[in-house]
Image: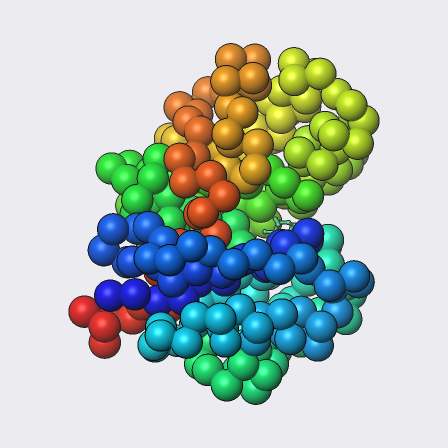
Amino acid sequence: MQRLGIDIGGSGIKGAPVDLDAGKFARERLRIPTPDGGKPDDVARVVAEIVAHFPDTDGPVGCTFPAVMSSGVALTAANVDKSWIGTDAQALFEQVAGRKFVVVNDADAAGIAEMRFGAGKNEKGVVLMLTLGTGIGSALFVDGVLVPNTEFGHLEVNGTQAEDLAAESVREEHDLKWKQWAERLDEVIAAIDRVLWPQVIMIGGGVSKKSEKFLPHLHPRARTIPAQLLNDAGIIGAALATVTDADA
Ligand code: BGC
């Protein structure tokens, strides 16, 4: 079975049909830059353009969004335009693109993909995925079942939000050395550990392709492993999120 997956990020909106049995793109992905300001109507137009580019997919379109998503409605807007708060992204995309949509949190989608096809494939128990990018996203799994919309990136660590301390964007902005940045990430992971005892932590986001630079500097209690699907995780997870029992 194939489903179209779309990943909305701060700089690009990417989509591809996904072969859900193989966990791979069935066609080359299309990336369109995120419109300046990232306002709902402008983003919806790009989403519709991506849908139109892949006319052969059927079923609902899966889409990620970097916010708490409840029944398709964005409830937060940490790193996106504030007008998203309260926007029914699902209804908006359906209206503009003329297809059914399922819209989920970006980190949850990436986690779903990693659990099915990547680093979390055979992992049971409490597994936490952290995505390090513009912000810090999280996805929590208990025996493979997602607990949606966890937001560990907003946990307070030493008087500041975890994502303001240790997101990948903070490393770049402050030109931090990998070791310095890893120390910050260690603090975030230790703070998470005080309230949750994951057995495994998967580190994802753009930075996961450079895991050899920072993983050796981390001192986590939990087994900490790099994500495997790298930039494809969001699209693959979005496509997987469209599958319901009726598809079985
Ligand atoms: C948002 C999350 C999102 C994460 C990664 C955070 O600021 O609150 O919902 O998953 O960034 O994009």
Residue 218 spot, x, y in % from top left: 55, 17
Which image quadrant: the N terminus?
bottom left
Residue at left offset 80%, top offset 62%:
37
Q: Looking at this view, is 11 or 150 the one in front?
A: 11
From the viewer's perspective, is 157 left or right of 110? Answer: right
Residue at left offset 30%, top offset 65%:
2
Which image quadrant: the C terminus?
bottom left
Res. 92 image quadrant: bottom right
Is there any visible trace of residue 239 in the rendered image?
no
From the viewer's perspective, is 68 left or right of 224? Answer: right
Residue at left offset 69%, top offset 39%:
163
Residue 173 spot, x, y in % from top left: 79, 32
Q: Looking at this view, is 104 or 236 the one in front?
A: 236
Q: Is residue 191 above or below residue 111?
A: above
Res. 61 image quadrant: bottom left
Q: Residue furthest left?
A: 248
Q: Is residue 177 above or below residue 47?
A: above
Q: Is residue 215 above or below residue 246?
A: above
Residue 46 spot, x, y in % from top left: 62, 70
Residue at left offset 73%, top offset 53%:
79
Q: Looking at this view, is 45 or 161 the one in front?
A: 45
Is there any visible trace of residue 182 in the rendered image?
yes
Q: How many marks?
A: 0
Q: Is residue 12 above or below residue 63?
A: above
Instruction: Identify the image's colour scheme: rainbow, by chain, secondary structure or one colour.
Output: rainbow
